Image (spheres, helix red, strand yellow):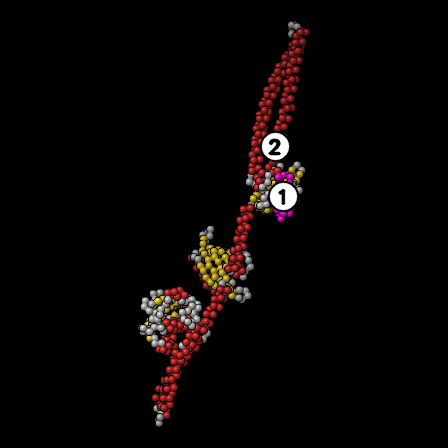
Amino acid sequence: MSPLMVANTWRRSAARVVRVSVLMMRKPTIKSLSSAEQWLLGSMALALGAVAGIWLLLGPVPMAAPHFIAFVLLIASLAASLVMMGLVGRTRRQMEAVLEGRLSAEARAIEALRHSEAQWKEVFEHNPVMYFMVDATGTVLSVNTFGAAQLGYSVSELLGKSVLKVFPAEEQSAAQSNVAICLENIGQTHSWEICKVRKDGSTLWVRENAKAVRLDGRLIVLIACEDVTERKQAENALRQSEMYLAKAQRLSHTGSFGLRVASGELIWSEETFRIFGFKRAPSIKLATVIQRIHPDDRGRVQRTIDRASSAGKDFAHSYRLLMPDGSIKHVHATAHAMKDASGGVEFVGAVTDITARKRAEMELHEAQATLAHVRRVTALGELAASIAHEVNQPLAAVVTNAAACRRWLNRKPPDLKEARGTVEAIIKDGNRAGEVIQRVRALVSKATDQRAALHINDVINEVISLVQHELLIHQVSLRLELSPDLPLVIADRVQLQQVILNLVINGIEAMQPVADRPRELVIRTCQDETRQIVVTVKDCGVGLAAENAGRLFDAFFTTKSGGMGMGLSICRSIIGAHGGRLSASGNAGPGATFQFTLPVTQEGAP
């Protein structure tokens, strides 16, 4: 018997009680009215008999007073009996009409109740909710058709069986415990979610609402079960997706965040908390996070967020974190601006721990610096003859001028004026030799990146002084087209010398096979339409092969039989680090042109 069927049974019982009560009320009332009528009729018959007896005994004699009074009383009694009989009859008819009306109404009520019971039974049987009624031992007393079908059973297959039949083994103890809790708290509703097993072995999740009640002195548990399988599957899918996302964020060292500008509240993912070194919490204040940022970056980060918040624009920036243990982390944050429900600005973004990348970049930079140093030393080795020539010229002049000075001093009297002139010449030649040696030492040194404002033309002239002998022995004429009054650039002098030296040597070597035309190397400086400094080195050598154009700046790619393939790659890295660009192209005629650009000012330069 189902809970609704129990309620309907109560309703039917109440209707029967009402109908029986009405019938019981009707029977004694009608019976008493019939007895009254019978008594009146008997009284009237007796009165008529008395009148007739008096008439027969006395006969038609003059009426005497006693006889007349008796006669009148008899007539009055007869009349009263007739009136009372009429009143009783009318009352009986009214009572019968009322009772008939009540019986008709009760019949209609019973019919309506029967119809309502049929409707409720139809709703109960086919309502898309599973209903169970079990006793204290867990035996199924009733189950609706829909519920049984949902589990793959017929109603008869479940009635009288243990309710544990529809639970997997791992859930049966929980099911028993839930029933026990209901029996301990009679009349209270309890809810829980539990997994059930269908007849075919598949599972479904339900939310059960149960209450223990007494019916005919017997404890039963009424259970309504709502199918929540789809919701559970969605929750499991969401939980799994969140797990995958958390693992992916952990692997990529990228966390997500949301920022409510109005409240300064940040919502972080688990990985974001790990990156910043805070304990996980529902939210965290922006002011707290700002204090974790490196003091040197704190103001810049705050200004970036303030500008983006005021303009409602996206932003991206990199900064450092100063962790509680004193270590430094490098992070990069990107955020997208959007409007919240009240029209305020909020951001959704991601923050990536780039500490490992920064460390790798520093190591790569150090490796490149070491390789560049090796390249510089190698280039100087190739220019040993030229350097020796450059140093030998002033040293020879020093010796010559010293001999002349001695002669001037040996005269009688000594010619001090001439001697003084030769000494000045010695000093000049000594300084010239010292400058050459200083340039060589600068190129050989492994000094760190030291950027300062400089004239690019001065750097070119310093390099040319080192390659004069190389140009001479290879019969290469040099043409300088250096634009005057160029603005200063912020750069490392030694690194730019290395780039120009490498391009000049490449140009000289490219023209070695040329025998049918003059060998000319052109170095040109100018300023383009974007106000960048442009340096061009143009030769008239063998040119660039089309198949090699795309690989020219790749590391370890070379067209020389004894080359390392690192010269141009290092040059491009140096120019790129200075905010410029190095490119190569073939000439309209013979030869090739290498060109690099340098910005006049650079962000972050001293």
Residue corresponding to mark 2:
12
Question: What secondary structure prevails in the magenta region?
Answer: helix
Please tell me whether mark 1 sits on a helix, a strand or a loop: helix
Q: Quadrant of the N terminus?
A: top right
Q: Are marks 1 and 2 in contact (CB under 8 Å)?
A: no
Label 1 to label 2, Cα distance in Å?
Answer: 33 Å
Q: Is residue 580 above or below residue 385?
A: above
Q: Amino acid at mark 2?
A: Arg
Q: How many marks?
A: 2
Q: Camera-side residue: 548 or 486? A: 548
Please tell me whether mark 2 sits on a helix, a strand or a loop: helix
Q: Seen in the image, is 149 located left or right of residue 450? A: right
Q: Camera-side residue: 362 or 427? A: 362
Q: Seen in the image, is 561 located left or right of residue 205? A: left
**246 in the magenta segment:** no
**179 in the magenta segment:** yes
Residue 165, numbered label = 1
Q: Disc 1 or 2, which lies upstream in sequence?
A: 2
Q: Camera-side residue: 475 or 536? A: 475
x, y percent for residue 17: 63, 30
x, y percent for residue 377: 44, 75
Q: Which segment is the magenta one? A: 157-183
Q: Camera-side residue: 188 or 27? A: 188
Question: Splitting the image into 4 quarters, where does residue 44 fall?
Answer: top right
The residue located at (62%, 39%) in the rendering is 157
x, y percent for residue 10: 62, 34
Q: Seen in the image, is 482 located left or right of residue 7? A: left
Question: Splitting the image into 4 quarters, where does residue 88 fall?
Answer: top right
Outermost residue, bottom side: 412
The residue located at (33%, 75%) in the rendering is 477
The residue located at (55%, 40%) in the rendering is 128
